[in-house]
């Protein structure tokens, strides 16, 4: 059994997977700790206690079905961040195998508990992706064991579904992916542009067409090469990693791209990293590891792979279906999921701008941390950190139904000057006391042209469309808690 289990030549790849995944876990737990009170806390926009009262445990397994308090949530998030930080610096890998597995299991269970009560705020594909890969990481071993070949194949299977699913949803979706024109719009209309997105949008259109064509090759062809012998599998993974780095430069997609990179390095053999002089000085990475490991662990790894194979039936059916859906979990533990993004691309950008005023004073705008607001505000770099409110505001601009029921609740929180809510914003235009009225205004945005930018310094041009939510006072919005 050991000959079919120990993966010689992938020690550095496993090291990078474990450290990279720990870094993503650390970011995810910090995001939860910093944002939960305003979003899902007991006084938040969609409180966890209300959610667990109507949704049974079997549909959303979570520690917080047993008990919820803001203090307990904070303890879970900060405990997860601590374990992730220790894993990132290599402490976890040096523990005995059972303890290493326990640390990874605790991180997975803690984040599962958060995601399963996170409601719409945690409805993104990268949440399930982190949980799926995090579950497999429980069984990747420690510094004293060889990388388990079945688990490395399982990681490639996740990467295959991530890339191929995204490629299929594009090819089957918006016609602009098939005529290679989607990038005429995408960099301008994506949920949260980055500091280089303005320049990406201004690239020559023929280059945009080349980018789309290359994307199709990367997502629809190269994933099959992951299961071919080396060096083909590693070469395909390297191309995917480089493509993901290109996406990192072009926008803010939380930790989605970084998770794809983590998965990609699992398929790259040690010889490549040695050629780059990466990891060769790390005793953990350079060790050929002490054999296959204990029998109980070997058997458990094979059981996990068999479980993944069985749970993959639904996602595979979804892949081959003409009615393919994106980012769906087929089990409440998020063990095997479907992925995909941007099956359709919006042609113009709409933004919800929230304004307030005190008495008969002027309307003043609340600036968000990441999403466009002021026309002079250059998009910032936030990923892999995830600004959950900013992302949901992008969806609200597309369809107001995404703001139900929390958008009017957000306005109430601004009317009472809720400190946790104000922490999610870049600044508070009413430092001396909350406004008496607030409203949500819908605007159409576009990037400025080169001439406009040189003349004004503005990064955006915007036109008012209408009031999305007319001016309301505190008396107009009842307390929902």
Image (cartoon, helix red, strand yellow):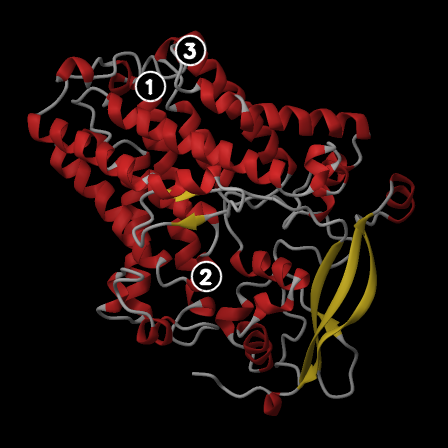
Where does label 3 land, which residue? 272
Q: Residues within 10 Å of mark 3 (few under 14, many from 20)?
A: some
Residue 315 image offset from top left, x and y in percent: 40, 41
Q: Earlier in the sequence, mark 1 or mark 2?
A: 1
Q: Which of 84 and 442 lies nearest the eye of the viewer?
A: 442
Quadrant of the rendering where the N terminus is positioned:
top left
Quarter-of-image position of residue 173? top right
Q: Which residue lies most toward the left here? A: 295
Residue 391 image offset from top left, x and y in percent: 58, 56
Q: Residues within 10 Å of mark 1 (few under 14, many from 20)?
A: many
Residue plotted at (77% across, 38% down) = 184
Residue plotted at (53% across, 73% down) = 406
**Distance in Å between CA atoms under marks 3 and 1:** 10 Å
Q: Is residue 401 left or right of residue 225?
A: right
Quarter-of-image position of residue 230? top left
| Residue 284, visible in the rendered structure | yes
Where does label 2 land, which residue? 35
Q: Nearer the viewer, mark 2 or mark 3?
A: 3
Q: Which residue lies most toward the bottom here? A: 475
Q: Is residue 117 above or below residue 286?
A: below
Q: Determine whether label 1 and label 2 are within 8 Å by CB.
A: no
Where does label 1 land, which residue? 12
Q: Which of 390 and 428 lies nearest the eye of the viewer?
A: 390
**Distance in Å between CA atoms under marks 1 and 2:** 35 Å
Q: Is residue 272 left or right of residue 151?
A: right
Residue 360 image offset from top left, x and y in percent: 78, 87
Q: Which residue lies most toward the front here? A: 322
- Which numbered circle lies on residue 180? none
């Amino acid at each position: 059994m050991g000959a079919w289990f120990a993966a010689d030549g992938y020690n550095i790849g496993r090291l990078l997977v474990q450290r990279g995944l720990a870094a993503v876990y650390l970011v995810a737990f910090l995001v939860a700790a910093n944002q939960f009170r305003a979003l899902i806390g007991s006084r938040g926009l969609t409180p966890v206690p209300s959610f667990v009262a109507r949704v049974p445990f079997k549909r959303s397994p979570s520690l917080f079905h047993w008990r919820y308090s803001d203090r307990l949530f904070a303890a879970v998030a900060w405990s997860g961040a601590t374990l992730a930080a220790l894993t990132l610096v290599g402490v976890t890998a040096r523990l005995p195998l059972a303890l290493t597995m326990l640390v990874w299991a605790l991180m997975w269970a803690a984040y599962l508990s958060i995601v399963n009560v996170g409601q719409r705020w945690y409805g993104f594909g990268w949440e399930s992706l982190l949980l799926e890969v995090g579950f497999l990481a429980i069984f990747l071993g420690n510094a004293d064991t060889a990388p388990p070949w079945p688990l490395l194949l399982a990681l490639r299977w996740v990467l295959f579904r991530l890339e191929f699913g995204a490629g299929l949803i594009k090819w089957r979706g918006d016609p602009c992916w098939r005529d290679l024109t989607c990038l005429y719009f995408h960099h301008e209309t994506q949920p949260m542009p980055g500091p280089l997105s303005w320049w990406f949008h201004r690239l020559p259109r023929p280059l945009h067409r080349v980018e789309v064509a290359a994307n199709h090759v990367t997502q629809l062809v190269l994933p099959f090469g992951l299961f071919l012998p080396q060096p083909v599998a590693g070469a395909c993974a390297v191309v995917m990693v480089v493509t993901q780095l290109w996406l990192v430069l072009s926008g803010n997609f939380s930790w989605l791209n970084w998770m794809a990179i983590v998965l990609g390095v699992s398929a790259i053999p040690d010889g490549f990293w040695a050629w780059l002089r990466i990891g060769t000085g790390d005793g953990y990475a350079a060790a050929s590891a002490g054999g296959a490991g204990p029998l109980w662990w070997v058997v458990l790894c094979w059981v996990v792979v068999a479980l993944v194979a069985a749970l993959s039936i639904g996602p595979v059916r979804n892949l081959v279906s003409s009615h393919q859906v994106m980012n769906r979990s087929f089990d409440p533990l998020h063990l095997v999921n479907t992925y995909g993004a941007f099956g359709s691309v919006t042609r113009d950008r709409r933004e919800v701008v929230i304004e307030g005023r005190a008495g008969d004073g002027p309307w003043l705008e609340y600036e968000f941390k990441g999403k466009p607001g002021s026309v002079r505000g250059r998009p910032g770099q936030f990923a892999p950190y995830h600004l959950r409110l900013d992302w949901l505001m992008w969806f609200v601009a597309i369809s107001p139904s995404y703001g139900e029921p929390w958008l009017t609740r957000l306005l109430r929180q601004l009317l009472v000057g809720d400190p946790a809510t104000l922490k999610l914003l870049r600044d508070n235009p009413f430092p001396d006391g909350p406004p008496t009225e607030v409203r949500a205004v819908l605007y159409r945005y576009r990037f400025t042209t080169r001439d406009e930018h040189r003349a004004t310094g503005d990064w955006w041009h915007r036109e008012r469309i209408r009031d999305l939510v007319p001016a309301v006072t505190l008396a107009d919005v009842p307390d929902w808690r």
